[in-house]
Image: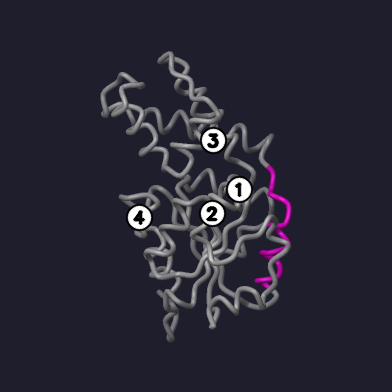
Amino acid sequence: MLRAVIFDFDGVITDSEILHFRAFNAVLEQFGVELTTQDYYKMYLGLTDIDCFGMLIRQGLLKIDQGRIPDLLERKKVVFEEMAKTEGRLIEGARDCIGMLAENRIPMAICSGSLLPEIEVVLEDAKLREFFEVIVSAEHIRAGKPSPEGMLLTLKRLNENRREPIHSGQCVVIEDSSWGLEAAKAAGMHTVGVTNSYDAAQLGLAEKIVGNLAELRISDLQQLCA
């Protein structure tokens, strides 16, 4: 039985992955570091901001002390929010999917490696904030995807005011990356992959793959949880 849908944010609801990429490079520029689009999508896209900066330090590309990461996070947040206000846009099909779930009274949540202010600014601008009972972002977890920590915390928060708890097997997670799909499966949840960031071959962990969220029907999601 389908009782909840958990969305990733970047690459699923909003076309902001490229904005994150540009914001990272804007911050890294002062250190003489520039990520290529290919490397970002291959190695860093699924990471939280703190994990991304940490990996760059461990790789020896970013030659600073770990203690400077909080400053970089704040700078990146400011740059991203400025971009999102003028360049952020919803991915085609996302609003249709959210509307379909709302019509069927299916609780919705977001589990994302982005920071909460980055998520809120886009949702408020798109007038979609009201549809999401729970948002779990990078500030709320210690380990990002593919760890299931965020997914399990999202489910825990969905259940806080429910008499009959939602179980993992009653949740469908919609993701655009293998990291997110792995996290969902580790949490015991069902999965839909959407080919906004990677092609179908790279989303092989998903139980169902679509090219656009408007293709999804409530019956498709119910069948996954049957």
Q: Which numbered circle lies on residue 203?
A: 2
In this figure, which colouring scheme has been used for the structure? one colour
Q: Which residues are magenta?
A: 89-102
Q: Which numbered circle lies on residue 93?
A: none
For disc 4, the marked residue is: 147
Q: Which numbered circle lies on residue 20?
A: 3
Amino acid under label 1? Answer: Asp
Q: Position of residue 108 (x, y in %)?
A: 56, 67
Amino acid under label 2? Answer: Leu
* Discs 3, 2 touching: Cβ within 8 Å: no
Estimate the spatial distance between the alpha carbons at disc 1 and disc 4, rounded to whole Å.
22 Å
Pick the residue in front: 8 or 73: 8
- In primary-sequence order, the first of circles 3 and 2 is 3
Estimate the spatial distance between the alpha carbons at disc 1 and disc 3, rounded to whole Å.
20 Å
Pick the residue in front: 100 or 173: 173
For disc 1, the marked residue is: 199
* Discs 1, 3 touching: Cβ within 8 Å: no
Near mark 3 (Cα within 10 A), the count class, few <14, some 14-19 or many ≥20, is many
Q: Confirm whether the magenta stretch covers residue 98.
A: yes
Does residue 155 sit above or below 54 in this rendering? below
Does residue 115 sit above or below 160 in this rendering? above
